Amino acid sequence: MRVSRTKGEGIVSPDEQRQRIIAACERDGLKLLEVFEELDVSGGAALEKRPGLSQAVAKIEAGTADVIVVAYFDRLVRSTVVQAELVTRVEAAGGAILAVDVGHVTNGSAGQWLSGSMLGLVAEYQRRTTAERTEESKRRAIARGVPTFDRIPAGYRKRENGTLEPDPVEAPLMAEAFRMRASGASIQEVRRYLNDHGIKGGYTRFQKSLESRIYLGELRFGEYLNTASHEPIIDRLTWERVQARKKVRGSREKSDRLLARLGILRCGTCGAKLVVGQQHSNGKRYDFYRCIPQSDCPRRVTIGADRIENYLTDYLFSMAPNDRPFTMAQETRSDDAELERELLEAEQELQGYLVLTKAIDPRLAQEGLELRQARVDTAQQAIAESVPAQPFAGFEIPEGLEDEFRVIGEGTGLELRGPAIRGFWERVPVEVKRIVLSRLFESVTVSPGRAPVEERVTVERTA
């Protein structure tokens, strides 16, 4: 179910879409597994920016679902490029797409492809013409000082003519929040101050607020900018001091923990990925996995690294059958040299830019620094998620277990008998263990609390 805007006229209600989907499944004898809802999501957005549709495609490709159902074709996509990718991926995985109003969306025959493509062109045309009609009205609104967005930032309120004016109660609080941050307060401290004084919100909301130029009296829509739209709440020097507080991160050391960067550990409260944390006490280091500190999770999860890793290892051993081979195949390929080269270039560009900005006010170069840091972060993430093309190539069979092991696919996979898996696990490096776990487990959800680990963990295996 998708809605481009949750406010305004002409909205196709999510409830109506849901009822049409349920009725279609009952009519066609389909078992409805899950309903994904996308609110304030454009039909022209790329597939990776469609959270619900992406999850649906992932389930088709994993073999845990067969059909994607939408109430109306234009709820599916409003982009011919995205439509082509979507249909190709779903049908390549043996799945199907059903739009209740037009029937099956498929490239099966030339006629079906033509019909689907024509529908896609009409949907995209409607999106483009709507954007063209609204762009001019938004430009005029910006020129008048009228926001083109619905959510008014804390500290301001709307006049009857739609323009902004400082809220007599909230504006002084937001001004103080900026002064606190400029003087060295953390975002969490600013958040507590605002929450205590009646302005509610999470870490991310106030982080973005402290970066917003609206508080300088500016209003923007795309390339249209009004630098004197409304009365500012703070002065430019204070705003720039706040921006200078943002730190440019250097290269982060990779954790050697077994489940680090796999992305399979999930918070049972908010669903976020768990990250590695450390605590030092009495000269010893204690590792754990936790919900990210910056999240707004109402009940964050923390679990000892050894506890969850040992539990999953034992779970893996229990999966290995004794009566038939246990196969671990690897199909993903990566070019490690290319990934490392990209990271090196990104880091060199960042360091060079840092040297350059020493000659000017670094606050004026903040956007450039963020862009270069983003490239470094992307390169680091690509390396973290990459796997060797042939992880088992050259793997030496442990002595005495030659009859239990067999390398397959020229090093891309390994086949072993159930009882031999413990010997295998004890002898392979952590990189290979991560490959195995990422291929066998779809997700591992950890609930908050202090119950035994087996009561807190829910494991979802891959198909």
Image: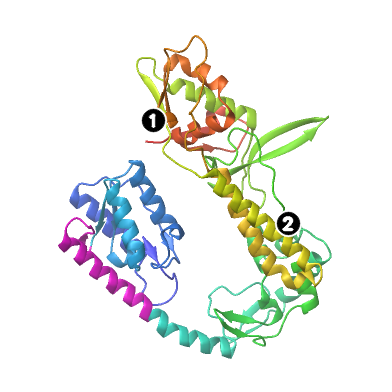
The answer to which of 135 and 419 lies nearer the viewer is: 419
Residue 50 drawn in magenta: no
Amino acid at the residue labelled 1: Gly
The answer to which of 329 and 211 lies nearer the viewer is: 329
Residue 193 lies, in percent from the top left, at 75, 62
Instruction: Say which quadrant the C terminus sits in.
Output: top left
Residue 148 lies, in percent from the top left, at 53, 80
What secondary structure is found at the residue carrying circle 2?
A: helix
Residue 69 lies, in percent from the top left, at 28, 55
How far apart in space, not on screen, are marks 1 and 2 (Cα)?
51 Å
The answer to whether one can see residue 297 in this image is no
The answer to which of 417 and 346 lies nearer the viewer is: 346
Left or right of 12, for residue 189? right
Residue bearing mark 2: 188
User: Which contiguous range is marked in magenta?
Assistant: 101-129
| Quarter of the view holding residue 111 | bottom left
Q: Residues within 10 Å of mark 1 (few under 14, many from 20)?
A: few
Residue bearing mark 1: 409
Work out whether 37 lies above or below 159: above
Q: Residues within 10 Å of mark 2 (few under 14, many from 20)?
A: some
